[in-house]
Amino acid sequence: VSSSSSSSSASDDDEVEDWSKYNGEHVDIVGEIAGEKKHDFSQPPQPEGSLKIVSWNVAGMKSIIGKGFDAYLADEKADIVCLQETKIDGKNVAPSVAKGYTHRYFNVCKTPSAGYSGTAIFSKIKPITVLYGIGAKEHDQEGRVITAEFETFYLINSYIPNAGRDLKR
């Protein structure tokens, strides 16, 4: 399609699909059955020697435990799982959760609002070192950052507070 302006547009003969109905989600269309589009949500094979890291704001660890968290982990087959907004005190995570992840790290809220914010890393690979926080006491009390050093990379799991309308944070 040629155009004299800097932007190009589809010609009348081109069929343009309205992608707005997918609400910003990326999906691969793999075929059409009886006029219905079929989407492929399967995961591609993981390249040899690569790591799979997933990150999830769980809005409360207790809420996901009874809703298939272990099944999700089994399906996802991630090497490392980063969780944000765990809302736990570090004592109330059942050892049966995430059984395949032998290295578990929790940074919990230490303010009077215990059970607020918090981050966690579940890993099948032992990190060289694990650091909690960013070195700023006023922020580190909320358990918002865990940094894990691995042989070839650093993993930073963080839960960033909402500054609110007045940008107070």
Image (cartoon, grey):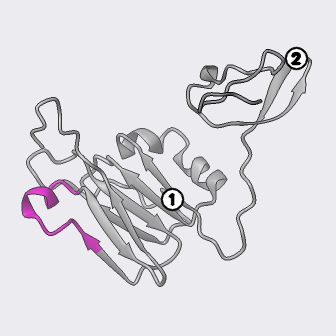
In-image side of 110 versus 96 (left or right): left
* Residue at the farthest front position: 4
61 up-or-down from 140: above or below: above
Disc 1 element: loop
Disc 2 element: loop
Q: Is residue 2 magenta?
A: no
In-image side of 30 versus 45 (left or right): right
Quadrant location, the C terminus: top left
Residue stretch in magenta = 131-143
Q: Nearer the viewer, residue 106 or 36?
A: 36
If you read the primary sequence from the N terminus, does the residue marked by circle 1 or circle 2 appear first? 2
What residue type is disc 1 on? Ala
Q: Is residue 142 magenta?
A: yes
20 up-or-down from 159: above or below: above
User: Which residue appears at 52% of the width and 47% of the height?
Assistant: 69
40 up-or-down from 112: above or below: above
In-image side of 102 versus 71 (left or right): left
User: Which residue appears at 16% of the width and 48% of the height?
Assistant: 114
What residue type is disc 2 on? Gly
Q: Nearer the viewer, residue 2 or 145?
A: 2
Whole-percent x, y for residue 97 in the image: 48, 56
Q: In the image, which disc is placed on residue 98?
A: 1
Whole-percent x, y for residue 43 in the image: 71, 51
Badge 2 is on which residue? 35
